[in-house]
Amino acid sequence: MQPMPHQLMGYDRAITMFSPDGRLLQVEYAKKTVKQGSTAVGMVCSDGVLLVTDKRIIEKLIVPESVEKIFQIDDHVGATASGILSDARVLIERAQLRAQQHRVTYDSPIDILTIVKDVCALKQICTQSAGLRPFGVSLLFAGMDSKGPVLFETDPTGIFFQFKATAIGEGEAEVQAILDKEYKSDTTIEEGLKICIKALLKVLDKTFSVERIDAAYIKSDEKKFKKLTRDKLEKMFREVKKK
């Protein structure tokens, strides 16, 4: 890490202090934390929406099934994260509670954008309040709304964007380059899963294995969050490795 320029020293001590060139350094550090997190990919497909992530299991004695990287928010919404996962759990539980409250109050499923805005509002507060630190995590929210499958990314600043396909975490730029090249609007969930596994195999280290993959999808016609089974993932993994 290069030494910090003298003129910036001190401006990274407080979250509320802008540097002379208009930067909030603590927020920038939080975004760097996300880039060191495990890789997560989201994709809007012709028949639904897909989330695929690397569990980054490096200890041999860890039980792979005990590591959760994709979370169900409601029947029609799922989310995954990259960065500090303990930060992510706080935001995930907030989103789950918000979805439950909406369903009880209005007897209807919550709109994905409402959840995204609520989470981003809390993230933004943590960029301008003394005594706090930014959430060191980016989240991908995927689900079904009235117009069909949607995918949103939120970052530590509290900003959000809607994507057709995107990646966060380790190797973000390399995975995004693969998505830019291979993603098409008529890509199915099964084809999208193959693209994601191919990208993870290419970008991550040689020890990457099927045990490290967590994946979930929501089909347009069912509108139900479902995790991919280990057998299905192993079959896909073998098919991709053969090519």
Image (tube, rainbow, N blue to C red):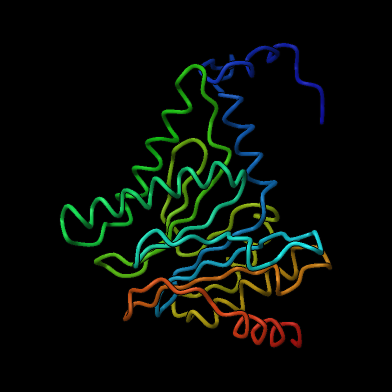
Residue 111 versus residue 90: which sits nearer the camera? 90
Q: Quadrant of the C terminus?
A: bottom right
Residue 195 found in image quarter: bottom right
Quadrant holding the N terminus? top right
Residue 212, image x, y percentages? 70, 67
Left or right of residue 111, residue 171 in this image: right
Q: Is residue 195 above or below residue 28?
A: below
> Where does residue 189 sit, x and y in percent of width and height?
49, 79
Residue farthest to the left?
106
The residue that appears at 57% across and 63% down in the rendered structure is: 41
Q: How many marks?
A: 0
| Placement of 176 over or under 239, stated as above or below | above
Q: Which residue occupies 66% across, 74% down?
A: 197
Q: x%, y% of residue 103?
A: 23, 57
Q: Residue shown at 45%/74% (left/top)?
A: 226
The residue depicted at 17 percent of the width and 60 percent of the height is 107
Q: Give x and y (percent) for residue 32.
A: 66, 39
Q: Left or right of 175: which side holds 119?
A: left
